[in-house]
Image (spheres, rainbow, N blue to C red):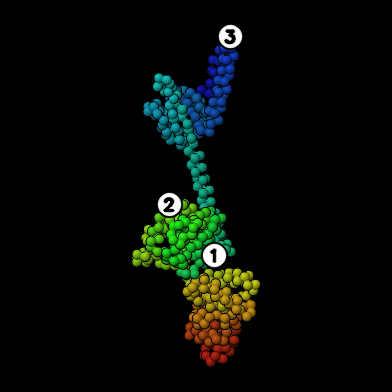
Amino acid sequence: MSSMNKNHQIKKVILPFKEIIKKKKRNNDQKYLLKYIKELEETNRELDAIFKFSHDGIFVSDGNGIGIRYNDSYCRITGIDAEKLMGIQPQKYMSDSATLKVLKSRKQETTMPVLESGKKVLITSNPVFDKDGNIIRVIANARDMTELINLKSQIEEVKELSNRYYSEILHLRSQDVKIKGMVAESSVMKDIVETALKIAAREVTVLITGDSGTGKEVLARTIHENSEVKGGPFVKVNCGSIPENLLESELFGYEKGAFTSASKSGKTGIFEIAIGGTLFLDEIGELPLALQAKLLGVLQDMKFTRVGGTKEICLNARVIAATNRNLAEMIREKKFRKDLFYRLNVVGLKIPSLNERKDDIFPLANYFIKRLNKKYKTANTLSHGVINAFISYDWPGNIREMENLLERLVVLAPNEQITMSMLPDYMVSNVDFKKILVLQKNVSKENGLKTILDNVERKIFEKLIADGYNSYKMANLLGINQSTIVRKIKKLGLKINTMQYD
């Protein structure tokens, strides 16, 4: 039955009733009944509008499953002609009718029938009972699964696109991190920085490992500055620099009178200072076993108490630990707790030594020179020979060694160019010149030999001659004239083949 027919029937009942009321002499009853009828008409219009404009399809059957009412959405979703729905049972057009199942089970039923059109819809039917428990209506709600599947597919596409954009943003951010001190030109360091930026948004505990001087603290600060707690403090504690008998009170603080020499007002510990920010536990491998157990408890509950106190304090801070020790070996030697290692190493980042990422040497040197020039108001540059020596050198002290060396060179440089004559002997004597020529990517070959002083020229030519280089090959590799090569070698008393051949 259509909405128009339904309204017409209601009016057929209401209008005669109005005429009867008008003939009544009791005015008060008449006004009350007219008001009540008006409210019923308004309610009917509202329900009819809801039924009509529902996005889900609605199909109403009687107690025998015969269709008596529907809305336009039901026809749109099912693709069934509206005229065919009235006065019949739904199984004529559906392979699996939820309405008929409701008549048998007397409870809610959901099916996904295949319609004559081949279309799939999700239909949920609910029974309506009279006061005697008889089913008088079955209300079926139809939802187009095609629309939902398409919507899900669109959401997945948007999600995939969002993830791709996010990865690209991380990559771009990793390229810009050098401004804040983290230079990452080598592929291995780019991967580390991208991972660090990705986990910065997550409140997970991070363990950074690597040799001394590789930049563990810089990476920790990078994570902090790109996290949600970047506005909070970055609190560093060197676990190896505080005496063992003071370490607990320094970390957790103490209440007044906690021990003989305790301050009368007590003391706030490092953990408490770090609340709202990042707690950086440097040299975690130096932490005594007794405190390792206590730290494990704190990290498990994220709560601690001051020495001599009973009140628990929530450690609302991000925790990053770092070490240059081999924790796996320390665990085997019973010097480090395995359970603490797993608690700290939720995400592990291992920074390779500078010798393992040669592509970062020149950018790092360039970064430090610019920073030091700004600090000391100088305009120093590195000669090609110095850069070559830097690339060849193994850097046992890693980035810290490079920074300290460059600061000394900038301060002591007699002019604006830092040359090989200013380098320490151990750096010059170990230069592998053939390796330099192969590795250097950022240095021009032109005038390369002019920056090499007399005290190393012999070593260069002896090495190249021993490797079978002729004067033409040397000229090509060193970027100078072949005649200059012959003149210098003759001056040194060395012999070389001057014929041009490969």
The residue carrying pointer 2 sits among few (fewer than 14), some (14 to 19) or many (20 or more) residues within 10 Å by Cα, namely few
**Residue with the mark numbered 3:** 26
State the residue in front, 122 or 436.
Answer: 436
Q: Amino acid at mark 3?
A: Arg
Q: Secondary structure at mark 3?
A: loop
State the residue in front, 280 or 147.
Answer: 280
Are the residues at dot 1 and dot 3 in contact (C-beta closer than 8 Å)? no
Q: Secondary structure at mark 1?
A: loop
Image coords of residue 80 (percent x, y): 49, 30
Q: CA distance from mark 3 to mark 2?
A: 80 Å
| Residue at the image position 54 percent from the left and 26 percent from the top | 47
Q: Amino acid at mark 1?
A: Met
* Circle nearer the N terminus (2, 1): 1
Are the residues at dot 3 and dot 2 in contact (C-beta closer than 8 Å)? no
**Residue with the mark numbered 2:** 310
| Residue at the image position 52 percent from the left and 90 percent from the top | 494
Rendered view: 34 above or below 82: above
